[in-house]
């Protein structure tokens, strides 16, 4: 970060700190003390338990400053108002008495018991485990709620996933008014609406999705035309069914995204919308919003048409089926698939040439039994079939953003939900560049373009090298997080000047917003939405919450799987280092656990060298560096904490054989250099 940016940030923080009220997110510690995290403020605002004013952990609040920050003290305040609840549904036990009941919540965050009228208990018995929704809470009184589900017969792993969803601020199931509104939507496409759209039903159209997908929100059409080819990127027209300000729309906006856990999807929209009306299922006419490209024989884009269409999918492919066609050059619609893949690979090559960063990614998926228990782990890598879809979706997203970016209202840019990605932070980038140099990889930080070129060269050079894992992971951590905003600063990671999310409206609310604004522009009636930035901020926050839930769900399944392998040994790679130990990820399953410094204490005393991402033994000089290969043993699997504990196998064996430990350490100085013996 430049000195100018730092000064600007500090001044803004001072101005905000001097204001009477601030807005931020309340974080309540296990001890019961609260801290309001305010953007741009370097220090959080301390809130004492008696000053929460009905606010709970994770709520967005307005806080009034009662004590400014002193020379050594922390700014203190009281919560004036809860702006938005993070969580309103909770899991716990019911305490039933003669005239009323109380709900006793589970979890490590302090919160009051919830009063439940007997008429709202679903006749759950005393001590029953239940899910409760808080309906009201006036300051000075107990919160009031209703029992929404009795959980006595629910499996522990099912309950854990539900708790993860609730803790992340998402609802399970849909309110009655939303379901009633959805049920009233006709499933027949009106002839008058078909007549208003571009009819693409006679053009070959296919979908390509994961084998277990049910919500098909994108399809590709393909045909030869004079001078080249026409490729249509067709996206489910969710905005046709979900009208603004309806109960359905408000619920979708509140969620803002679907949440994908290892054994389920918590959808943004009811199944009737996501899996039926809008899903581009084969052999059914569907309404879509499309970007139709005219391509030369080489694959250059000559023209792009944007608008509403009606399509008919001819076939549903899985990624595996398309990959087989690409590799064997044989199969259903092979000519069309191979041509689309040729174009996609060309787009991909051009992107990287123009500065996009080629971070590789692996997807871990769990093989589950009938009780949703993991019985295997599959590590999937991105192949050309995935890249085929990815490149055409990126193309459509870019062209839609470029089109909207040219529109102005009263001389100002049209408020539009862009997807942006900022340049790397210099404070994170410089230590990473210094670390990469230790492995012989040069890093040019003079300009954004040279940084991107350096990243791509590094990622290419480390393929198959021992340092590949560590440099890839650390490189990703230097990157800024992509967000939604009306301020278009471009997408650094993709190398695009204009970019948005247009292609997944079934699972992302920003895509629905994009469709609505795009239609206004096509109708030549663009409107300046004054709340666009607020909506973008909400969608970014919900996206982060969903990602945290997905990580928690994956972690739970990892623990659930490896609990059956206690005492067994695996090859691992060090994935993180801290003063209290190092994390290792099993090579076979990608399951991460902690090897604590305490478990190494009989072998050596270790210190943390933060700049080198490693632990160093003070006597033996033994190093544990991020990216190193290690042999580990599974020693504990705690489902409640979603935590795995490993033991370094060599250290464990040395504990059992002290003589071997002495031999290992014999004749070594700190730093691992052997003492030279004097010649007699």
Image (cartoon, grey):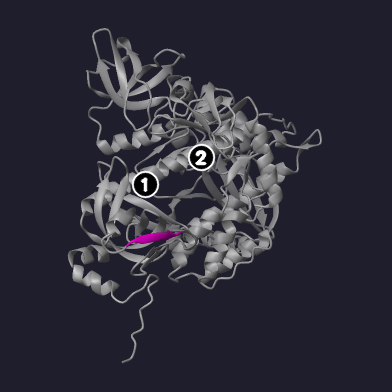
Q: Residues within 10 Å of mark 1 (few under 14, many from 20)?
A: many
Badge number at residue 248: none
Quadrant of the image occupied by residue 524: top right
For the question of whether residue 287 can be seen, the reply is no
Can residue 177 be seen here? The reply is yes
Residue sitting at the far front: 680
Name the residue nearer the viewer: 360 or 3.
Answer: 3
Q: Is residue 303 depicted above or below 111 in this figure?
A: below
The 10 Å Cα crowd at callout 2, few under 14, some 14 to 19, many 20 or more, is many
Residue 641 vertical placement versus 188 (above, below): below
Up/down of 657 relative to 178, above or below:
below
Give residue 360's position: percent from left, percent from top.
49, 60
Q: Which residue is mark 2?
A: 543
At x 35%, y 47%, the residue is 555
* Left or right of 500, for residue 571: left
Residue 481: % across, % down: 56, 47
The kind of secondary structure element at disc 2 is: helix
Q: Which residue is mark 1?
A: 554
N-terminal-most mark, 2 or 1? 2
Instruction: Identify the residue at image location x=35%, y=18%.
Output: 114
């Amino acid at each position: 970060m430049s000195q100018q940016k730092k000064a600007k940030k500090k001044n803004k923080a001072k101005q905000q700190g001097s204001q009477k009220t601030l807005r931020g997110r309340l974080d309540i510690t296990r001890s019961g003390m609260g801290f309001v995290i305010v953007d741009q403020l370097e220090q959080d605002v301390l809130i004492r338990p008696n000053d929460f004013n009905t606010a709970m952990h994770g709520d967005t609040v307005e806080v009034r400053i009662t004590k400014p920050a002193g020379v050594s003290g922390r700014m203190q305040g009281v919560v004036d108002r809860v702006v938005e609840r993070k969580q309103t549904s909770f899991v716990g036990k019911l305490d039933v008495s003669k005239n009323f009941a109380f709900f006793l919540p589970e979890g490590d965050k302090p919160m009051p018991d919830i009063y439940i009228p007997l008429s709202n208990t679903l006749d759950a018995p005393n001590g029953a485990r239940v899910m409760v929704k808080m309906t009201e809470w006036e300051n000075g009184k107990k919160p009031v709620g209703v029992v929404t589900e009795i959980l006595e017969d629910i499996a522990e792993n099912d309950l854990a996933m539900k708790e993860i969803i609730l803790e992340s601020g998402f609802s399970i199931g849909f309110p009655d008014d939303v379901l009633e509104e959805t049920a009233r939507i006709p499933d027949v496409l009106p002839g008058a609406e078909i007549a208003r759209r571009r009819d693409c039903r006679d053009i070959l159209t296919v979908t390509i999705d994961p084998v277990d997908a049910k919500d098909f929100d994108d399809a590709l059409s393909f045909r030869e035309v004079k001078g080249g080819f026409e490729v249509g990127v067709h996206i489910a027209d969710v905005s046709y069914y979900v009208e603004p300000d309806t109960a359905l729309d408000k619920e979708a906006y509140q969620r803002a995204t679907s949440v994908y856990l290892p054994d389920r999807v918590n959808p943004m929209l009811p199944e009737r919308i996501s899996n039926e009306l809008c899903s581009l299922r084969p052999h059914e006419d569907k309404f879509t919003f499309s970007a139709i490209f005219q391509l030369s024989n080489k694959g250059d884009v000559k023209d792009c048409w944007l608008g509403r269409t009606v399509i008919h999918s001819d076939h549903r492919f899985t990624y595996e089926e398309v990959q087989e066609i690409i590799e064997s050059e044989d199969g259903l619609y092979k000519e069309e698939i191979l041509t689309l893949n040729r174009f996609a690979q060309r787009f991909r090559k051009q992107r990287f040439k123009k500065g996009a960063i080629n971070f590789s990614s692996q997807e871990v998926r769990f093989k589950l039994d009938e009780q949703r228990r993991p019985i295997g782990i599959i590590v999937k890598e991105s192949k050309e079939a995935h890249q085929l879809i990815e490149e055409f979706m990126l193309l459509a997203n870019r062209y839609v953003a470029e089109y909207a970016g040219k529109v102005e209202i009263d001389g100002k840019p049209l408020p539009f939900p862009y997807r942006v990605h900022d340049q790397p932070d210099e404070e994170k980038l410089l230590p990473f560049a210094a670390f990469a140099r230790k492995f012989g990889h040069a890093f040019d930080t003079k300009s954004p373009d040279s940084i991107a070129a350096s990243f791509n060269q590094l990622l290419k050079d480390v393929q198959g090298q021992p340092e590949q894992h560590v440099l890839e992971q650390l490189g990703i951590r230097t990157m800024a997080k992509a967000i939604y905003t009306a301020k278009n600063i471009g997408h650094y990671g993709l190398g695009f000047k204009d970019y948005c999310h247009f292609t997944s409206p079934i699972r992302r609310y920003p895509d629905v917003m994009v469709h609505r604004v795009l239609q206004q522009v096509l109708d030549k009636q663009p409107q300046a939405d004054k709340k666009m930035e607020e909506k973008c901020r909400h969608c970014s926050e919900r996206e982060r919450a969903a990602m945290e839930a997905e990580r928690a769900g994956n972690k739970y399944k990892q623990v659930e799987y490896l609990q059956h392998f206690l005492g067994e040994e695996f090859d691992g790679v060090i994935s993180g280092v801290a003063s209290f130990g190092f994390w290792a990820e099993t090579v076979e399953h990608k399951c991460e656990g902690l090897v604590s410094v305490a478990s190494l204490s009989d072998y050596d005393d270790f210190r943390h060298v933060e700049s080198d991402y490693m632990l160093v033994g003070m006597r033996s000089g033994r190093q544990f560096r991020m990216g190193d290969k290690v042999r580990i043993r599974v020693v504990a699997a705690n489902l409640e904490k979603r935590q795995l504990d490993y033991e370094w196998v060599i250290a464990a064996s040395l504990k059992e054989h002290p003589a071997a430990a002495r031999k290992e350490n014999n004749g070594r100085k700190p730093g691992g250099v052997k003492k030279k013996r004097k010649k007699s």
